[in-house]
Image (tube, helix red, strand yellow):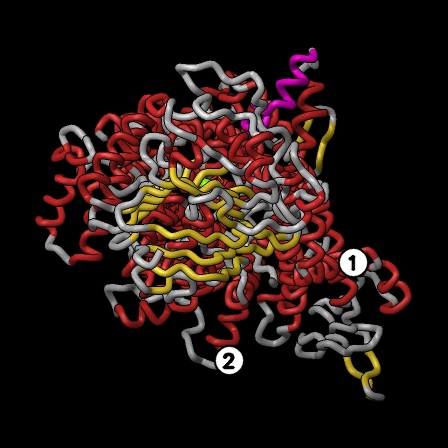
Amino acid sequence: MGRFIVRRVIQMVLVMFAVSVLTFLIFNVIPNSDPAVRMSGRQASESTIEAIREEWGFNDSLPQQYITTMEKVITGDLKSQFTQLSVGKEIVKGLPRTFSLAIGAALLWMFVAICFGLYSAVKAGKFADRFLTIIALIGISMPVFWIGALANYYLGFKLGWFPNGGYVEFTEDPIDWFYHLILPWTVLAILFIGFYSRVLRSNVLDTINEDYVRTARAKGLGERQIMIRHVLRNSMIPIVTLWGLDFGAVLGGGAILTETVFDLQGVGQYTAEAIGQLDVPPVLAVTMFSAFFIVLLNAVVDILYAYLDPRIRLQ
Amino acid sequence: MADALLSVEDLRVSFATEEGVVEAVDGVSFDLAAGEVLAVVGESGSGKSVTAMTLMGLTRSPNARFEGTAQYKGTELIGASEDELRRVRGAEIAMIFQDPMTSLNPVQRIGKQIVEQIQEHEGLPDQQARERTVELLERVGIPRARERVDNYPHEFSGGMRQRVMIALALSCNPSVLIADEPTTALDVTIQAQILQRMRDLREETGAAVILVTHDLGVVADIADRIAVMYAGRIVEEGTLDQIFYDPQHPYTWGLLGSITRVDKPRPARLPAIAGLPPSLANRPQGCHFRPRCPHEFSECSKVPPLEAHVQGNPEHRDRCWLSVDEKLAKREVLPGEIGLASKEHAPA
Amino acid sequence: MATEPLTEQAGLQGPAAWEQEAEREHVHGLGPWRLGLRRLRRNRVAIGFGVLFVLLVLSCLAAPLWAKHVAHTTPTENHLSDTIKLDGKTTNVVGLDGVPIGPTYQGEFFLGADPNGRDIMVRLLYGGRNSLMIGVVAALMTTILSVVLGVIAGYFRGWPDLTIRSLLDIMWSFPVLILGVALGVALALGGLQLGPITIGGDSLLIPIFIIGLVYVPYMARPVRGQVLALREKEFVEAARAQGAGPLRIMFSEVVPNLASTILVFFTLLIANAVLLESALSFLGAGVRPPNPSWGTMIDEGVDRIATAPHLTIVPGLMLVLTVLSLNVFGDGVRDALDPRAKVRLEH
Ligand SMILES: Nc1ncnc2c1ncn2[C@@H]1O[C@H](COP(=O)(O)OP(=O)(O)OP(=O)(O)O)[C@@H](O)[C@H]1O
Ligand SMILES: [Mg+2]
């Protein structure tokens, strides 16, 4: 197990390096225009552009440019071209909010998806299964920002059942925190519920036909024990991987749309605002950090996976 | 047989498929006495596994339909409720499956998988159930059983895993053990070891065994009686000697001809059975073996009943329209030419 | 985040599996495709949604007809100071308080107007053309790239495989939306230079390029897996023994066997591409105004949801219907081609 972890960590570092290079290429090399002009935002003066060119070393060789960029990203020296605020500080400020959104939504979608997926698989082919299938497909077909905007307006503003967007610190008032997050959690979870319940359903259906489930049945175990001990545990293994990745993605700013619609002021909304201004440094930082985050969580999940499935450890 | 432990009567299992209704088991009847070994032999697809699974209520398809009866100690198994079946499964009738590689849960320690069954039926405390498990593993011949009980299935070889399966099956002292091709997935030397072990255990435990196989050679040393299946039907049934030395059905002749004998060359006159088994959805009318049978005649378009034909042997039954004399004349297997080395000179 | 669902495809079973099934079921000599078609025909829901998608596409294609002959306007024409007769009364298209008119259910302003006095119905149809065009072309691009990369990696193995796989893994590390946004922001000013072709920053080709690129890992990986399995098959061995070169084998033996995977993926890719387009446009990193697309229309509408909710609801519904019809149809196609389709048949 120790060797496995070491190998996985080395691999993780290599992938992170590659990710940073790709991010650098996307922002500074692939586009067909002067990076200094892009970096300066709209309607920048000639002198601003020159200053940026100087600061980022856009006249240097590419490897040197890469090093300069990475230095800025890592030391937190990155500044929004628009507000002149430190990108690192803003991200750190947004993180608790984004984390609140991510953790609640992730738990919600996992729980509901397990229920839906399992029920759907047990009732495969019957009406309940078809019904849940359609519901799941509707879930994955709805743009988050659209359903979020409608929910916020109708349930929050018109009916007044929920607060009309906004965020309250957990330390300030846990109940209000929860109350403010119910709608965002639900809206963010809808897509994932649709998706995860489909994956779980098909995993369960595959597992149900495994020989060892037949063995479990031949042992005289009850349906519930078979389902939980033998089917669910084995069907969950691939889902755990996915869950880690998606949780990482949401945490790394992937919930841009939900945060914006509900005005949660997390990392995602910060990014969305930067996008609207074509403000490159924040977008660059968020892109790189979210990928780092996913790579990290991916490694964690792999290690967890090896723990869940003893066959992996040997490879 | 009034004293039968398990009595199957006209069992039919059909599946609705895209291509029409498939009669996987088409009127199978047999009795199993306590302590007896019944071998069920037939080509792939003849319905052996479906028969065996159905007895334990393990044929779980929404498209399956069951008819007929199977009485175990007076309890009806076909159509029994899941609760009734659970009491029988594992405790009264246990099953060993064909592929030991996939029949154990890969993410659970083997000990736990056996303990689970013991506790389900006997409610023993953890420590005792574990002790019993270690004993069982020792009995089926797993070395260092005390350490091995905490291993995962992938840490065992195929043969060892099949032993674990046997230990699992025997863990609650069942009266009937159904072994569905327990050795097919293993290589030849391991096969022999496993069969040997099963024979010993049968002596020790006195469990009746239904041994499903497609290889007559496998059953020669262990079976008391043999039922030969073809396309969902039992075409011949009799004692070991009756089947080996006086086979009545042309299909049985073919099966006997395909046994590989190491000590003797194959008789030159005996061709392997020509042709393929019929596709299930549109089987021939009458005798299913008709299209492949070299001795087909007009009568064969009617379904032959499973009846005793040989004088003085009421338990030797077959489904063939040929008379006993005709069969004797047409049969290409001569007594002693095929069969058991040790019984070469037994009377036909 | 509107765009994860493609990973589900990792579980897609290849033709090898359903061929086996088809062989088993194939009493009357039905090929796997015929068998699939038969199963699909029985799935009324899937067929229904397939037809719905075709209707949606056709109506979007007919956008100029509606604009010219029914609505008498264009998607970008403002009618800020125009009036319209409603039930005999004359009404302003855009009220004095800036609130546009809601659905009139008559030729002009059938679904109302936006704050600039533009006809929503006309914009919806034209926007649909853009959204669908982006979806289809991007899906096509993803498919071609994925098949090429997947086949090369799976067929040659060794270093081409290692290179392609690493590249895909790195792309895989970025959340789809973030990668799309990053490319969108980077390419917004100045556009892209691909060899001799220069693409302007507000061209529709930019979102197509972005969306077509970000989904490649999701499809190329399973394709590669299937090619790996296929290259060991007898018919490939046989072709190789007959002296066929790698290119020949790839195109005449391997790619045809990927057809069912490609088909299912393509359907679901369009759905995901349309969704991603809307998300990017909503964020301002996709289709650039004044070009309409369903995403930009929702973006413009959300700010006025309190006074004119139809601006948000209408384009969103169109989007959901389109994506849903593709998802249900794609799901049905997959079930039909998948041997493990667990359907209950009546006895
Ligand atoms: N769930 C099912 N649905 C449809 N047909 C089935 C199902 N289960 C079994 N069958 C069919 O019933 C027939 C008998 O199968 P069975 O597994 O009993 O054969 P077998 O004699 O055990 O063969 P083998 O030696 O290959 O194990 C097969 O042709 C199979 O296709
Ligand atoms: Mg079998």
Q: Residues within 10 Å of mark 1 (few under 14, many from 20)?
A: many
Amino acid, disc 1: Cys
**Residue at numbered disc 1:** C60
- Considering every residue shown, the one lying at the far bottom of the view is C88
From the top left corner, tell me how far across and down residue C160 is, in percent: 54, 19
**Viewer-proximal residue among C1 and B29:** B29
Mark 1 lies on a secondary structure that is helix
**Cα–Cα gap, marks 1 and 2:** 33 Å
Q: Residue at x 72, y 41 (%)?
A: C29
Q: Main secondary structure of the magenta part?
A: helix
Q: Is residue B105 magenta?
A: no
**In this picture, which residue range is highlighted in magenta?**
C228-242
From the top left corner, tell me how far across and down residue B142 is, in percent: 19, 31
**Viewer-proximal residue among B269 and A40:** B269
Task: Report which quarter residue A181 is drawn in.
Answer: bottom left
**Residue at numbered disc 2:** A158
Amino acid, disc 2: Lys
Say how many tags the image has: 2
Same chain for the residues under marks 1 and 2 in the image = no
- Considering every residue shown, the one lying at the far right of the view is C69
Q: Residue at x 52, y 73 (%)?
A: A153
